[in-house]
Image (cartoon, rainbow, N blue to C red):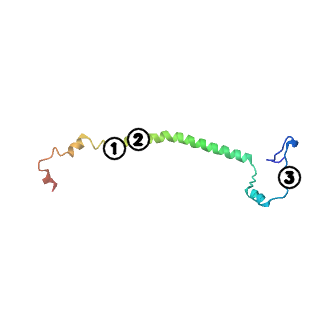
Amino acid sequence: MEVGQVSFKDQRKVKRVLVVQRENPIVNRLNKTKVEKKLDLKQERDDHLKELRRKDQAAQQQRVKEPRQAQEWKEKKWQKDHAYDDIFTEENMASTSNQDRDADWEDDFM
């Protein structure tokens, strides 16, 4: 028996239809859509397993990448929040303040 061949257990229950004349337009349309493919089950199984391994590996890499990325975001946020900490010290603020300057500080400007 061929692969894909249909058989029946009880031949008396099989209904047969007699076609009086062959209709070529219908047969031609059917032949255009006919697809014959040879099954290679071992290759399909190997491809399926390969795809599963690839998905598992991608998921594993994602699980490893997420904590690392979260740590990087945390570090960047800390750096952003503390970028001007050394600029706004009391010493720097006092040196740039106008409170302690002379009354004629405009003379020093020119």
Q: Residues within 10 Å of mark 2 (few under 14, many from 20)?
A: few
User: Residue at (81%, 46%) from the top-left corner?
Assistant: 6
Residue 8 on image: x %, y %: 84, 43
Q: Which residue is mark 3?
A: 18
| CA distance separating discs 2 and 1 | 12 Å
Residue 91 on image: x %, y %: 23, 41
Amino acid, disc 1: Ala
Foreground mark, 3 or 1?
Answer: 3
Residue at the farthest right position: 12
User: Residue at (84%, 46%) from the top-left corner?
Assistant: 15
Which sits earlier in the primary sequence, circle 3 or circle 2?
Answer: 3
| CA distance separating discs 3 and 2 | 80 Å
Q: Which residue is mark 2?
A: 75
**65 to the left or right of 40:** left
Q: Which residue is mark 1?
A: 83
State if disc 2 and disc 3 touch (CB < 8 Å).
Answer: no
Residue 49: image quadrant is top right
User: Residue at (88%, 42%) from the top-left corner?
Assistant: 12
Q: Residues within 10 Å of mark 1 (few under 14, many from 20)?
A: few
Residue 51 on image: x %, y %: 64, 45
Amino acid, disc 2: Glu
Which sits earlier in the primary sequence, circle 3 or circle 1?
Answer: 3
Q: Quick one: 3 or 95, which is closer to the camera?
A: 3
**82 to the left or right of 17:** left
Residue 106 on image: x %, y %: 14, 52
Amino acid, disc 3: Leu
**62 to the left or right of 26:** left
Residue at the farthest left position: 103
Q: Quick one: 33 or 81, which is closer to the camera?
A: 33
| Label 2: which secondary element | helix
